Image (spheres, rainbow, N blue to C red):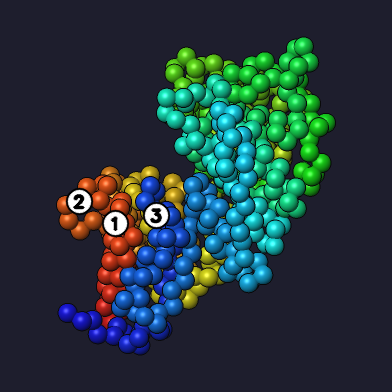
Amino acid sequence: MQLEPAGNFAESGKELKIVLAPDSFKGSISAAQAAEAMATGIRRFFPEAVLVQIPMSDGGEGLVETLVASAGTRSASSAGRIVFEEVTGPLGQKVRAFYGLLDDGQTAVIEMAAASGLTLVPPAQRNPLVTTTYGTGELILAAVRAGCRRLILGIGGSATNDGGVGMAQALGIKFLDENGKEIGWGGKELARIARIDTSGLAPQLQGIQIEVACDVSNPLTGPHGAAAVYGPQKGATPAMVQELDAALHHLAEVIKRDLGKDVAEVPGAGAAGGLGAGLMAFLNARLRPGMELVLEQTRFRERAAGAHLVITGEGKMDSQTLFGKVPCGVAKVSRELGIPVVAIAGSLGEGATTLHQCGIEALFSLTSGPMTLEEAMAQAADLLAQTAGQVARLFARSRRGSS
């Protein structure tokens, strides 16, 4: 059945404004691709509708792409770009990493996972006793040498548990043992630190503003710390977890003594194997909720103002989506703006209906019939286009019925 024009929307749909703000559908399509797929589906029914695409990220995977994509919405001259750099990977191998440039080169966006991420380490070689964040430091150094005065770091997806020491080593800070020799790489080396010498810190880092997208509240050590909570997924055995936790505790004590900073219990210090603590201690970084930072940087409030509907989504949505994930972050702000929100997920898990609490009016799954996970992921863009088109039609119909 062909839908008639809805409410006060013209037949062309040109008065209809819809914001498309999805996260990536991990392992399938990026946030930008997801937003474009949604737009494709909606245009089939509303070819002249105003569609505002705002690809999102919670500060982890896709942060660089998201903020680079949004950069051009400020002005043509401020369009962002991605820069590639060869840096040191988690196991000391060379990897091709990247960072984003925004604001005419004044701001850099860095995903630590691009240089020090778990996906860069084969499962059989995962060992946080030896992995390093050195490559993340090299990305930071490349950005500031390129002229950036502000850094935005996403620190999800790490393969490391070195407290950010590897990063600091790349930036010129020395961690010396009892004999005055520099320690090596990896979490196990932290126990050997006798003194921290910051005199060699790269001068380009003076006065740099650093904001860290961090959505975990874990302290550095203890039962809820970096090693205990995240070490096992990086390859740590129970014995290794104890060794890593003790090493991080030792690092925190030396930082407090030599640098005068007590970072051990700061919420988020344990993020990315203690990189959160290292960024605060060595670079005076500020940790912020990832969604808060992304919503601000993409100017979501300004660009969504006056919209009739917001469509968001991600690969899987369940009760955990309430805690700092894109759909709920988008929904909370949209609710403040008085805009209804619909979410589309690759799959809806246990507790998905709790997401109504954060302002999501309705939830839709991509799959409409029996389908394997592999098939769904391969067809994600087409399925997302179909579902978004149907959501728009249903919304338009509801507007007509309520007018």
Disc 3, SS = loop
> Crowding at label 3, few (<14), some or many (≥20) Cα neighbours within 10 Å?
many
Q: Which residue is mark 2?
A: 371
CA separation in Å, label 1 and label 3: 10 Å
CA separation in Å, label 3 and label 2: 18 Å
Above or below — where is 123 with respect to 191?
A: below
Image x and y of residue 278, in percent: 65, 33
Residue at image point 68% right, 55% down? 107
Q: Give the image quarter of residue 294.
A: bottom right
Image x and y of residue 115, in percent: 57, 39
Residue at image point 78% right, 15% down? 180
Looking at the picture, tell me which residue is in the foreground, 359 or 383: 383
Q: Amino acid at mark 3?
A: Ile
Q: Which residue is mark 3?
A: 29
Looking at the picture, tell me which residue is in the foreground, 233 or 342: 233
Tell me, yes or no, whether the two marked residues, 1 and 2, touch with CB atoms within 8 Å: yes
Q: Which residue is mark 1?
A: 379
Image quadrant containing the C terminus: bottom left
CA separation in Å, label 1 and label 2: 10 Å
Could you tell which of marks 3 and 2 lies nearer the N-terminus? 3
Image x and y of residue 172, in percent: 76, 33
Q: Amino acid at mark 1?
A: Gln
Looking at the picture, tell me which residue is in the foreground, 48 or 332: 48
Disc 1, SS = loop
Residue at image point 27% right, 73% down? 394
* Residue 220 in view in this figure: no
Q: Give the image quarter of residue 134.
A: top right
Q: Amino acid at mark 2?
A: Met
